[in-house]
Image (cartoon, helix red, strand yellow):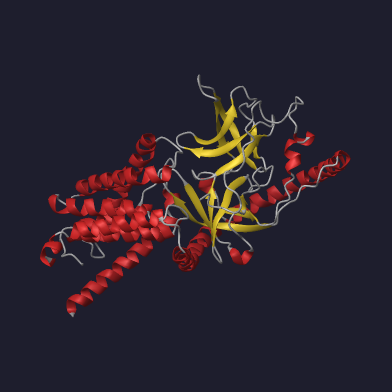
């Protein structure tokens, strides 16, 4: 019973976190862009979920975030869910093999996750409107670096205080 | 057997998520997805609106001063334009042209941004309750912003010119050469399908042509920034500087009324090229908006 309560509390916090991240993604991100490049908060959340609880929560969390993102956008329903499921799974599989609490490791994983995410998403959304590799180099990479820096700050000052602590690898929720 | 399956639960979960995602992409968007979008809109609307209001009240005094200056300037300009309109009206009647219609406007505030690596869509705080419908054009004080692609009761999504899906039939204000305006990456906004040798110069203003019936004629889109010709290409590469500052958009207006666009006026003497030739260049493909009002998503 106690473990169910604990799981419920964790899920409630996660739901609130996803809600907050999506709200910030819609209202704040464009204000903190630098030279037209902004971070991707949904990727950050997914990466930290996957590193925290492994591949299953990474995959399902990525899928759910992608679905919510699809609902919050007028186009490409399902594309974000596809990209984020795969990235969540890959990050979750990688988690146990790296020093997750290291900021440098987190930054490297965020950059890798963002690149993998856009490698899957861009061919779907680009729709012949530009050069795939140029977008990858001039938009994805700077955005990934920005996300990585922001991710480390958010982890230290937001995620860790609310219980998403990568120093302790929790058992899978599912 | 179940034990063996449990060992592969991570891969099974991945497979399920991938299959469902692909199914959602391939399948037509259902009523349930539309309902979910409406629910999301209802839930997020108060929060987005609150955040927007907080930001807006910060610069109110400064905005007020700027607006007073603008009103003074526009009053002068309005007086001059009324004279010009009266003269234009007389001339149009003399030439037997139909009167151009003007749409009703619904002012709206931007409350959400959906930005990907290459595209931008905006959420505004007006929806079906205010008469906003899918396919309605959206403008700012500077010019064309895009069109409504999704309208719920109190909020709507705008597909902006900075979205790869958006295409607008346009013409050069000076030379009347036509093309299609689309966002490309890299390069930004471009006037496409402009034949080699067409009279398009840097600094020209590009307007919506009214063809296709989605966007009314004469909305400002962008200024020609660069014109290039590459050997072997059939068309010139015309890069535009958008007149609307998409990164700083706060207020827009939705043109909700029926536009009585007069197709004849586009090709008529009133819009003829200064040299007296026909509008557009030789072999002008007479491009139209790629999306009709009946399919606002272009799907």
Spot occupied by residue A143 in the image (x, y as percentages of width and height) = 35, 44
Residue B188 placement, left or right of A86 = right
Residue furthest to the front in view is: B1
The quadrant where residue A134 appears: top left
B191 vs A37, left or right, is right
Answer above or below: position of B95 versus B295.
Answer: above
Placement of B294 over or under B175, stated as above or below: below
Tell me where residue B261 appears, x and y as whole percent: 72, 47
Answer with the quarter of the image where residue A172 lies: bottom left
Q: Is residue B54 above or below residue A3?
A: above
How many dots with numbers?
Answer: 0
Q: Residue furthest bottom?
A: A1
Q: Is residue A120 left or right of residue B160?
A: left
Foreground of the two, B139 or B290: B290
Q: Residue at x 63, y 55 (%)?
A: B254
What residue do we see at 71% from left, 31% from top? Answer: B279
In what quadrant of the picture does the N terminus of chain B appear?
A: bottom left
**Residue B69, percent from left and from top:** 69, 48
Residue at the far top: name it. B231
Q: Is residue A154 visible?
A: no
Residue B1 visible (yes or no) = yes
Residue B78 placement (x, y as % from top left) = 77, 46
Q: Nearer the viewer, residue B178 or A16?
A: B178
């Amino acid at each position: 019973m106690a473990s169910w309560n604990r799981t419920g509390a964790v899920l409630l916090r996660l739901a609130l976190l996803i809600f907050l991240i999506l709200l910030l993604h819609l209202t704040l991100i464009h204000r903190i862009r630098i030279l037209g490049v902004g971070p991707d908060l949904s990727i950050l959340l997914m990466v930290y979920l996957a590193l925290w609880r492994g591949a299953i929560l990474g995959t399902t969390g990525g899928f759910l975030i992608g679905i919510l993102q699809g609902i919050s956008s007028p186009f490409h329903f399902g594309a974000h869910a596809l990209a984020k499921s795969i990235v969540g799974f890959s990050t979750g599989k990688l988690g146990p093999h790296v020093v997750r609490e290291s900021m440098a490791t987190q930054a490297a994983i965020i950059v890798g996750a963002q690149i993998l995410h856009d490698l899957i998403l861009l061919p779907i959304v680009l729709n012949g409107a530009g050069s795939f590799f140029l977008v990858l180099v001039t938009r994805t990479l700077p955005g990934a670096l920005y996300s990585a820096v922001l991710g480390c700050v958010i982890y230290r000052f937001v995620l860790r205080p609310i219980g998403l602590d990568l120093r302790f690898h929790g058992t899978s929720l599912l | 057997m179940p034990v063996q399956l449990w060992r592969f639960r991570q891969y099974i979960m991945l497979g399920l998520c991938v299959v469902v995602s692909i199914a959602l992409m391939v399948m037509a968007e259902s009523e349930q997805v539309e309902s979910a979008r409406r629910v999301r809109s209802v839930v997020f609307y108060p929060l987005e609106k609150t955040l927007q209001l907080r930001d807006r009240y910060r610069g109110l005094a400064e905005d007020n001063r700027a607006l007073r200056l603008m009103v003074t300037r526009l009053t002068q300009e309005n007086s001059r334009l009324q004279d010009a309109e009266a003269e234009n009206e007389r001339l149009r009647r003399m030439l037997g042209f139909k009167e151009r219609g003007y749409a009703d406007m619904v002012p709206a505030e931007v409350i959400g941004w959906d930005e990907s690596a290459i595209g931008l869509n905006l959420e505004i705080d007006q929806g079906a309750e205010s008469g906003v419908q899918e396919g309605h054009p959206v403008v700012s004080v500077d010019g064309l912003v895009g069109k409504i692609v999704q309208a719920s009761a109190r909020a709507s999504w705008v597909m902006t010119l900075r979205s790869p899906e958006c295409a607008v039939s346009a013409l050069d204000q000076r030379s009347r050469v036509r093309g299609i305006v689309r966002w490309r990456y890299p390069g930004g906004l471009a006037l496409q399908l402009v034949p080699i040798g067409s009279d398009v110069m840097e600094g020209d203003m590009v307007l919506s042509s009214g063809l296709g019936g989605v966007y009314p004629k004469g909305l400002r889109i962008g200024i020609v920034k660069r014109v290039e010709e590459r050997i072997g290409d059939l068309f010139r590469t015309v890069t535009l500087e958008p007149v609307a500052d998409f990164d700083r958009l706060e207020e827009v207006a939705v043109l909700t009324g029926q536009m009585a666009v007069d197709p004849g006026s586009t090709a008529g003497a009133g819009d003829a090229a200064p040299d007296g030739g026909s509008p557009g260049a030789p072999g002008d493909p007479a491009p139209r908006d790629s999306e009709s009002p009946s399919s606002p998503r272009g799907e």
